[in-house]
Amino acid sequence: MTKKAGRNGSGGGVLGIDIGGSGIKGAPVDLKSGKLLSERVRIPTPVGAKPEDVAAVVAQLAAQFSAQFPDTASGPIGVTFPGIVRGGLTLSAANVDHSWIGLDADALFTRAAGRPVTLLNDADAAGVAESRYGAGAGVPGVALLLAFGTGIGSALMNGGVLVPNTELGHLELAGREVEPWASGAAKDREDLSWKAWGRRVTEYLEYLERLFSPELFIIGGGLSKKADKWMEYLTVKTPIKPAALQNEAGIVGAALTASERKS
Ligand code: BGC
């Protein structure tokens, strides 16, 4: 732990929670600096990742952090979800249980935690965080974040403003869906070298260049830590940066979005 959280909404101490396929991670975030105010707490994602079970973990993290940081006890919580989120409803479930589809997950989590919860897509949260505090800070035009992990998440940012739910990992390229072919999981499953994986990702990025003409690609997800391994193999014209906040980006972006929610 580095220091105590500040008051809610006054630039510090908003809780962010990142729901992933294998772990649910949370920490309070100092919104001035975009840094975590304490170590992340990670709880394994309940088997099957069913909504009620995941909500119980969200409630557990909320309770744990309000005991540790009383100042944050009644404030908003930002939560990421690895699928489409619109108006608090979860609308897709590529890598989690199908019972999430059409669920009012925002209301479920708000009930479970007893505090206002703001839900958004995991890659969108990372895009928001990178634009404010990280690799995309100060980019005036379009920056496209791609998060390579179990799936491929995307966040389309324009001058720091998010266009939510782009889901560009599910694009088709040469007759196949990109996600199962170029994700981090695909690299592991097929035991691809960095060079072979980099060739696939380059093909994908060239396609995205044709569609969006971005100023910058930000590569996030678990692989962002290993940029020295893959950077040389991504040979597109657009500048590429690894995500600066690495695996904290989801937590930070969720907290930031919750703190800025208007209604
Ligand atoms: C989902 C996206 C998510 C990405 C990363 C994809 O399968 O459709 O919503 O952002 O995985 O978790």
Image (tube, helix red, strand yellow):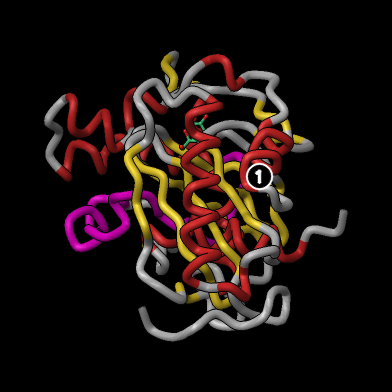
Residue appearing at x 48%, y 18% in the figure: 97
Q: In the image as oriented, which residue stretches furthest toward the front?
A: 67
148 left or right of 153 in image: left
Q: Amino acid at mark 1?
A: Leu
Q: Is residue 15 found left or right of 97 in the rendered image?
A: right
Residue 217, how many percent across, how many down? 48, 56
Looking at the image, can residue 238 be seen?
A: no
State the extent of the magenta-drawn residues as a range: 209-234
Q: Tell me which corner region of the image, top left, top right, bottom left or bottom right, holds residue 73.
A: bottom right
Q: Is residue 7 above or below residue 57?
A: below
| Dominant SS in magenta | helix
Q: Is residue 23 above or below residue 8?
A: above
Residue 227 shown in magenta? yes
Q: Is residue 224 magenta?
A: yes
Rendering coords of residue 96 (x, y %): 46, 24
Mark 1 highlights which residue? 119
Q: Is residue 208 visible?
A: yes
- Residue that lies at the very extreme toward the bottom in this rendered image: 3
65 with respect to 46 (left or right) = right
Q: Residue at x 44, y 86 (%)?
A: 3
Image quarter for residue 138? bottom right
Indicate the position of residue 77 as horizontal and vertical percent values: 64, 56
Mark 1 neighbour class, 10 Å CA radius: few under 14, some 14 to 19, many 20 or more: many
Q: Is mark 1 within 8 Å of ligand 1?
A: no
| Residue in view at x 56 percent, y 56 percent | 127
